[in-house]
Image (tube, rainbow, N blue to C red):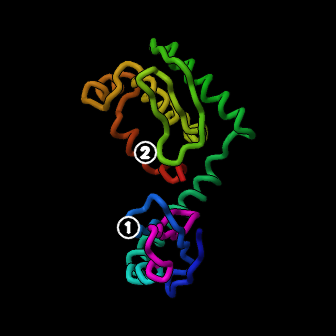
Amino acid sequence: MAGWVEIEGIGRVLMERSARARRMNITVRPFRGVRVAVPRGVSFGEAAAFARSKRDWIAAQLERARRQEARHLALERRCRPPATPEAAREQLVTRLAELARRHGFVYNRVFVRRQKTRWGSCSARRNISLNINIVRLPPDLRDYILLHELMHTRILDHSPRFWSELEKIVGDVKALNARMKSYGAMLL
């Protein structure tokens, strides 16, 4: 069960009953707005009062979310993806195979998905998951992410040895990571 409440200075806030919530919880997400998870036994009126008491915090988080939205939209205009998800998947899988061959990596399966929190991952079984938005990055950053995941087929953690081995292939890892932060809005 869910309902909307108008809070002065904030706007519309979604009150949503949550069987998993043990206490009231407020989340502010870009493009989604404000949500209050309302546990069983708590009325929507109590949840609205709780949200009103957190008005300043919510306003600050909304401002942050709006900046993320603006960065995301700017990146959308600048980083056009291929025409179809199939074309994007083909580009990523082909480039991953090229880099694996060139650097002697072996992986099992590749999954390309629209992920919201990460660019990629690699399982202990050497299965690699890639965010479809990687295809929209500049080529050097795209290769950096692919090589990062390929390196995980050899070293599963982020130990100093992992970073050292990755740096032998890609160069200045710190500089690449710093550049990647400016594209974080594409994960929304």
Magenta stretch: residue 35 in it?
yes
The reply to whether residue 64 is in sight is: no
Q: Is residue 69 left or right of residue 150?
A: right
Q: Residue at x 26, y 24 (%)?
A: 161
Magenta stretch: residue 103 in it?
no
Pinpoint residue 146: horizontal percent, then vertical percent.
49, 29
Residue that mark 2 sits on = 179
Q: Residue at x 51, y 84 (%)?
A: 7
* Occupied quadrant, residue 132: top right
**Tag 1's secondary structure?**
loop
Q: Residue at x 44, y 81 (%)?
A: 46
Pinpoint residue 173: horizontal percent, then vertical percent.
35, 34
**Pointer 1: residues within 10 angstroms few (<14), some, or many (20+)?**
few
**Tag 2's secondary structure?**
helix
Earlier sequence position, callout 2 versus callout 1: 1
Pinpoint residue 14: horizontal percent, then vertical percent.
55, 72
**Camera-side residue: 16 or 129?**
16
Amino acid type of disc 2? Answer: Arg
Which quadrant does the N terminus fall into?
bottom right
Amino acid type of disc 1? Answer: Arg
The reply to whether residue 172 is in sight is: yes
* Residues at marks 2 and 1, CA–CA distance in whole angstroms: 38 Å
Residue 20's place in the image compared with 118, above or below, is below
**Camera-side residue: 104 or 171?**
104
Q: Is residue 159 left or right of residue 73?
A: left
Pinpoint residue 61: horizontal percent, then vertical percent.
43, 70
Q: Residue at x 41, y 21 (%)?
A: 153
**Camera-side residue: 32 or 37?**
37
Disc on res. 23? 1
Per the rendered image, the range of residues in magenta is 28-47
